[in-house]
Amino acid sequence: MNKVCQSVADAVSDIQDGNTLIVGGFGLCGIPEKSIEALQERGVNDLTVVSNNCGIDDFGLGLLLANKQIKKMVASYVGENKIFEQQFLSGELDVELTPQGTLAERIRAGGAGIPGFYTATGVGTPIADGKETKEFNGKTYLLEEGIVGDFALVKAWKADTLGNLTYRKTARNFNPLVAMAGKITIAEVEEIVEAGELNPEDIHTPGIYVQRVVKGMDYEKRIERLTVTNA
Amino acid sequence: MNKVCQSVADAVSDIQDGNTLIVGGFGLCGIPEKSIEALQERGVNDLTVVSNNCGIDDFGLGLLLANKQIKKMVASYVGENKIFEQQFLSGELDVELTPQGTLAERIRAGGAGIPGFYTATGVGTPIADGKETKEFNGKTYLLEEGIVGDFALVKAWKADTLGNLTYRKTARNFNPLVAMAGKITIAEVEEIVEAGELNPEDIHTPGIYVQRVVKGMDYEKRIERLTVTNA
Amino acid sequence: MKDARITIVKRAVQEIKDGMNVNLGIGMPTLVANEIPTDFNVLLQSENGLLGIGPYPIAGQEDADLINAGKETITTVPGSSFFDSAESFAMIRGGHIDLAILGGMEVAENGDLANWMIPGKVVKGMGGAMDLVAGAKRVVVIMDHVNKHGISKVKKMCTLPLTGKAVVHRLITDMAVFDFTDQGMVLVETASGVTVDEVKEKTEATFTVAKGL
Amino acid sequence: MKDARITIVKRAVQEIKDGMNVNLGIGMPTLVANEIPTDFNVLLQSENGLLGIGPYPIAGQEDADLINAGKETITTVPGSSFFDSAESFAMIRGGHIDLAILGGMEVAENGDLANWMIPGKVVKGMGGAMDLVAGAKRVVVIMDHVNKHGISKVKKMCTLPLTGKAVVHRLITDMAVFDFTDQGMVLVETASGVTVDEVKEKTEATFTVAKGL
């Protein structure tokens, strides 16, 4: 019943070859960087990874690509990643591109027990190929399916010992949805507090979705595009 | 561009006969009691009301029933309401019973641009009658449709002048979904603060969904079932 | 509480394991909450938007903004969280509730449940019951074995409109406990002082008897 | 900025009215933000989960947890809110974004838009573009009128894979502004110093000319 793991390595120790992982983050923001590193070290292979992006060559999910641990990637945007490009062109990597909003909703749907839903997004485009359509009020919509993962890897700001999570600023992004959609959800966080210390009205992910919580050390939080104004 | 209305009567002044209203609240908790009272005074008729419950005889949506302003009710639970019972039996009132989770999801879907989704809820029961079904992974699911209202009536705790809302405890319930699903969303609140005074990470309903905000006075917040322990 | 209720509630609480997230239906299931061992970390979910229901408030400390799905004033426990109804049913529909304990009017030998309407009587609505039986990981129904006329509520087929088809995992009555398996309905326990033959006599449904009973 | 870009951006900002919630695409559309009148109450949405984007941070005050959809470090304005990606696209798909301004590779006379992939080149992905064009109340595309070879990007039919079918409400180029109506594509403005004939010459698409032009 204790959800708090002693190390990130422990937290991801039963992820197996061939598993489907749903991974939070947008670009390099709010990614579970410690869980990814631990998976790189463990070396599990043939992973299907569902995540909006795929990191960059030397950070985030790019590390698992570089290690050839990913068999299939479901994402909305995979630009700016040379290794991805190589593996995609060589056919080593299978890629399913999904519009970002559809991807977010598919993950939420998976977590919410909804096997399919209709959206106007993508009608008449290549991503409609092979998908069922249906009319509602004279307009055509695509059927999109929910996604459930064997594991969900989440990065949050704070957790309590019951797995309740809060996120910081735009590091929230896909993480709350990803948390819903894992058969086992692993949340790595910057701080773990006692149950009752988070305001019940401000919890972004209720602990019911979270099976394991682990504190990550020394977050790098790399910035992809530093843009500033002069004071 | 100013979202703050001077009175509840002003806020609801353009609701018309025959409109569909989606109304927040669960039981008598978190209901937009002032907007309902204002509608009772204005006397618009033939309303279709979508709300989990229908108040009690002399409070909440029961007031509009007593006034015979409601033509059709979409709800999950309408017990404990004598006037409802009479009008339902006499055929004056049309009723569409929807499982509570399906109702919540239908309202969210309407607000999120999803015209339909599949759920296992209700398969093989009377509420499946006349509904399309579809199999996913060998299991049967029902197609349920999104709901959009001409107006959405929401009760929140605090609003800022941009319409950002926060709710208190279980008075949140359907309100954030209802806020999403109105062509015009009217939020009555206990307190209005300046933009920037609510923590951006703790806003439950972003102001983009809310067209009007109005401060209600003297909330009654009636308790339906007072249950206490002895100290 | 009547004896039958006590029997049922005491047996029902044994379904709850440490660490579970549990939804208790309105009525008799609500009484199960009081029997949960105090050293268990169990969170009770209320479908109106709370995980972590606490006891009823002390008189005078009730809060109109804090109620359970039965519209009763309640409190919260440390580590509770509030959320909206869509999130609440995402939990339920998505299989995140470990256990739902619900009342029943009729249960059939194939696991069908009827507990929301009686034709000819005024319909009150199904509330969240259909979602709970379709979505919870485990569905346990508790009810009297027979109605006030002595007629079995444990049926070959439900006569009342269904809440869900083949959704019940376990049925607990004042006489017995049944499981619903791929091999059909199985009697797995009898209440203290009740024989297997007595259960058979009072049960319309066809069932097998677990080894050793 | 090149002259063409300045022309386009200055014209594009006129699409933004006081009180709007606006999503600006990556690239040239992002530049529109700087031109919004400071007395306007306009909230900029970032599809990664923010309503109320502010300017770039002062050097040294950047926050890795606060970026826009282009992955640039940003700040927030008073009254901003953070939310998750599903909520963000509920706003977009549900028609709550008043205006989306996006870049384009090709726009066809029926309002089709292509802006996400070039066959034969490596696919980077559509990101949120398909959701934005399908969901925003009003979709304005901004792009150069012709490509670097002088070929019209305003087509009879798109040759590139579509981002959305009949989704563009208005197209703003360095030469002209077109609306897409039930009666087809209409030239509604020409840029300063550009004649209708020049537009016709540089445009593959068939269009009508608004009265008074």
Image: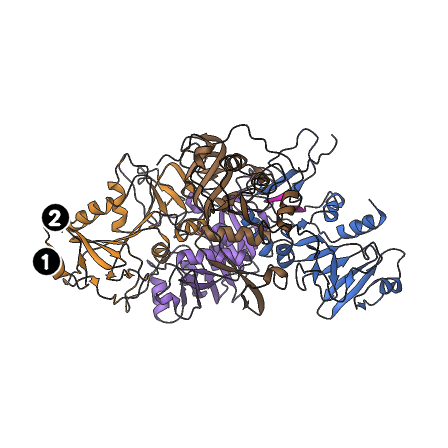
Chain colours: A purple, B brown, C blue, D orange
Can residue A85 be seen?
Answer: yes
Q: How crowded is mark 2: few (under 14 residues within 10 Å), some or many (20 or more)?
A: few
Image coordinates for residue B75, horizontal then vertical, percent:
58, 49
Instruction: Determine which of the numbered discs, if any, sits on residue D192 in the image.
Output: 2
Can residue A53 be seen?
Answer: no
Residue bounds of the magenta highlight:
C42-52
Image coordinates for residue C71, horizontal then vertical, percent:
65, 41
Instruction: Determine which of the numbered discs, if any, sits on residue D98 in the image.
Output: none
Q: Which chain carries label 2?
A: D
Quadrant into which the C terminus of chain B falls: top right
Observer-nearest residue: C187 or A70? C187
> Which quarter of the picture shows residue C75?
top right
Is D3 left, or right, of C145 in this rendering? left
Q: Mark 1 points at which residue?
A: D197
Observer-nearest residue: C56 or D124? C56
Q: What element carries label 2?
A: loop
- Please, what is the dominant secondary structure of the magenta stretch? strand
- The image shows residue C141, relative to residue C83, as above or below, that is below
Does the stretch in magenta take in C49?
A: yes
Q: Which chain carries label 1?
A: D
